[in-house]
Image: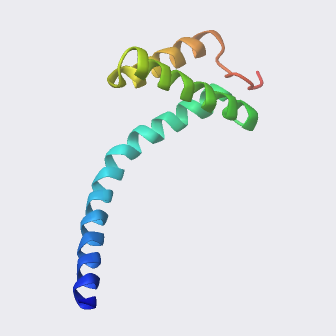
Amino acid sequence: MENLSVHFHTDSGVVRAVDGVSWSVRRGETLGIVAFVTVSLGGFGSVPGALVAGLLIGVIESLSAYLIGAVYKDIVVYSLFLSFLWFRPQGLMGKT
């Protein structure tokens, strides 16, 4: 019985590893873009700015997913990001 349990856990681990690799490749691109948006919105080289921008982006994503729909949350964040940087290119707390 113990041998069967080890075999079952090994098989389930392999299946989850293969599934995790395919999931992380698709999800990694979106996370990388959101990380870039967060750093550039906060201001390059400004840790407090990146913290504030990360919190702001999180709230905007959550509210837009709730109010508009989860499909459009990234579009809302990117459009607000571009419109903000149009008027303040150095970011929230970046230096000129």
Left or right of 84, for residue 51: right
Name, please, the residue furthest toward the right.
95
Instruction: Classify residue 15 as left or right of residue 59.
Output: left
Q: Quadrant of the N terminus?
A: bottom left
Q: Position of residue 96 (x, y in %)?
A: 76, 21
Residue 70, image quadrant: top left
Q: How many marks?
A: 0
What percent of the width, then of the height, locates residue 26? 32, 45
Position of 82 relative to 31 (above/below): above
User: Which residue is drawn at the image coordinates 77% and 25% (left, top)?
Assistant: 95
Relative to 96, is 74 on the left or the right?
left
Question: Does 29 sit above or below residue 61?
Answer: below
Answer with the quarter of the image where residue 75 lies: top left
Give the answer, above or below, for where 23 lies relative to 88: below
Please state the horizontal and vertical placement of residue 8, each as a whole percent of the image: 23, 77
Residue at horizontal 63 percent and vertical 9 percent from the top: 87
At 70% from the left and 22% from the top, the residue drawn is 92
* Colour scheme employed for the rendering of this structure: rainbow
| Residue 74 higher or lower than 12, as above or below | above
Tell me which corner region of the image, top left, top right, bottom left or bottom right, holds residue 29. Answer: top left
Residue 11 in the image: x percent, y percent? 23, 75
